[in-house]
Amino acid sequence: MNKGIAIYPGSFDPPTNGHLDLIQRGSKIFEELVVAILRNSEKTPMFSVAERLEMLKELTADLKNVRLDTFHGLMVEYAKSIDAICVLRGIRAVSDYEYELQMALMNRKLEPTLETVFMMPADKYSYVSSRLVREVAQAGGPVRGLVPEVVEFKLREKLDAASRLEERRLRAKAAKAANTKAKRKNVNDHRDHRSASTNGSNQPD
Ligand code: PNS
């Protein structure tokens, strides 16, 4: 076990089996691992930070040297504030490498004492990403095996709530359209009726 605190920063929207795999691996080699969720006001996440924290709390309950936190702003500043000596990031495939290398080198430029360590999740998770999980779930596809059960449940709960909301919105829209149509018909009927009676009164005897 390595002495010192490592930080595993990310969006975790939602946490996947790949994330969990990396957290488990990281917790074995660092004295303490802080899983830090980025609070990003520019993005519209699927899950709130509180929801992501709750899921991660449940997932890491048995890992005694894993702590959860949130941060905003520069990751290196946050890492410094908690005395982290290392950043843990996962690399699934070569395609991840370019972005991760760029980020690691930028972080090194910003804070030369902070090292980045890359670890690979189990190969069965090499294609799993939060973005794809969201996409599959939103399209009604199965995400079993890609995310922990608690996340699968929360995804279903969220999407069910969203579809109920959408259903209600569509029903309200249809009702409004029907109402407008009925009102328009009423006005037309009234006008027709008036013009018919006006025409009638003009008829010669
Ligand atoms: O799970 P993600 O979305 O790949 O995580 C990306 C994250 C949160 C690690 C990265 O965007 C980040 O560290 N953001 C904080 C802002 C920052 O420090 N940017 C400079 C990184 S080079």
Image (tube, helix red, strand yellow):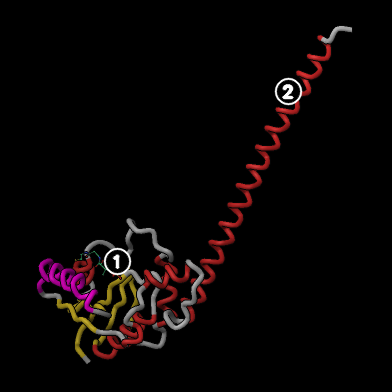
**Residue at the disc numbered 2:** 191
Given residues 194 and 122, the one toward you in this image is 194
Residue 16: x %, y % from top left: 39, 78
Looking at the figure, which quarter contains the N terminus?
Answer: bottom left
Identify the element where label 2 is drawn.
Answer: helix
Give, as a single range, the part of the protein colored magenta.
Answer: 94-112
Write down the quadrant of residue 74 in the picture.
Answer: bottom left
Asked if the residue at label 1 sits under 8 Å from ligand 1, the reply is yes
The CA distance from mark 2 to mark 1 is 65 Å
Given residues 135 and 108, the one toward you in this image is 135
Report the residue at 35% width, 86% height from top: 124
Residue 95: in magenta span: yes
Report the residue at 25% width, 79% height from top: 93
Write down the quadrant of residue 99 in the picture.
Answer: bottom left
| Location of residue 183 with respect to 176 vertically, above or below | above
Residue ranking furthest to the right: 205
Identify the element where label 1 is drawn.
Answer: strand
Q: Nearer the viewer, mark 2 or mark 1?
A: 2
Report the residue at 79% width, 14% height from top: 199
Check disc 1 and give the amino acid type.
Phe
Report the residue at 83% width, 11% height from top: 201
Q: How many labels were placed on the picture?
A: 2
Q: Identify the mark at residue 71; answer none if there is no mark.
A: 1
Looking at the figure, which quarter contains the C terminus?
Answer: top right
Write down the quadrant of residue 106 in the picture.
Answer: bottom left
